[in-house]
Image: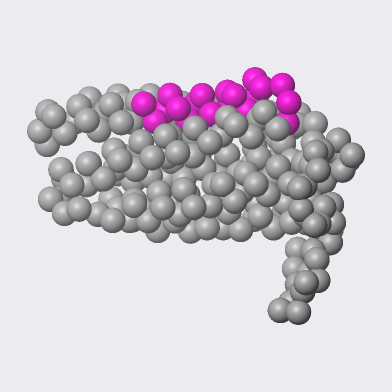
Amino acid sequence: MIEYALYFTVGCYGVALLLNLWRIAVGPDAADRILALDTMVINVIALLVLHGIWRGTAMYFEAAMLIAMVGFVSTVAYCRFLLRGDIIE
Amino acid sequence: MSFVAELLISIALVVSGIFGFVGSYGLVKLKHSLQRLHAPTKATTLGVGGVLIASMIFFYAKTGHVSVHELLITLFLFLSAPITANFIAKAYMARNLSEKELPESQGAFGWSVYDDPPEAGPERK
């Protein structure tokens, strides 16, 4: 039963990643692209944890944690660059 | 693994998958840029939260130990998501809205998106 639920959830997040890619390609403003990229990072965190459940190993939590941190920092840095024209003033 | 644990894990996984999909579908479907900020919050909170709850139940049922790594990821995401949304909204406002379109800031200074920060210090009056 867990296996089928995993197939369904991985499918959902795969389609969600494709929709985010579409928003990155189309998005009229740079803010839309940053938002889509941030959502992609969150979806990838979910996919990593799902992969950990699938393999039955807890090794992927560190990777998910690192991706969460790096994604957050990159989003804030890019917004800061758009906002002030500089990242560290 | 007992049937109840499998059922709980499957329910959490399916619910989180639906919410993750809804978040990204809203990102495509909603019309305005500031409306689009609303959709991915579902993917952040309920989507990733459901996956992490499923993972906690799974590893507890498998090994018998409670793992706290998932709580760390959840905590970090819940702390960082509002900051990210605030920054994206500020970036959009600074690029697309002029200061005249906004209401007064009701303070001594203008909105921080458009003005330089005031000269702060202990001697400020």
Residue at the farthest bottom position? B123
Q: What range of the chain is rendered magenta? A: B15-33
Residue A77 higher or lower than B4, as above or below = below
Residue B34 sits in quarter:
top right
Left or right side of B65 for B108? right
For the point 66% across and 40% down, the residue is A35
Residue B62 higher or lower than A73, as above or below = above
* Quarter of the C terminus of chain B within the rendering: bottom right
Residue B44 higher or lower than A14, as above or below = below
Residue at the farthest front position? B125
Q: How many marks?
A: 0
**Residue B118 coordinates in the image, percent (x, y):** 80, 66
Colouring used for the render: one colour
A19 is within the stretch colored magenta: no
B19 is within the stretch colored magenta: yes
Residue A20 sits in quarter:
top right
**Residue B97 coordinates in the image, percent (x, y):** 85, 38
For the point 12% across and 28% down, the residue is B3
Residue B61 is at least partly visible in this image: yes
Main secondary structure of the magenta stretch: helix
Residue A18 is at least partly visible in this image: no
Residue B64 higher or lower than B6, as above or below = below
**Residue B54 coordinates in the image, percent (x, y):** 29, 38
For the point 20% across and 53% down, the residue is B66
Residue at the farthest left position? B2
* Quarter of the N terminus of chain B within the rendering: top left
**Residue B111 coordinates in the image, percent (x, y):** 79, 50
Left or right side of A68 for B62? left
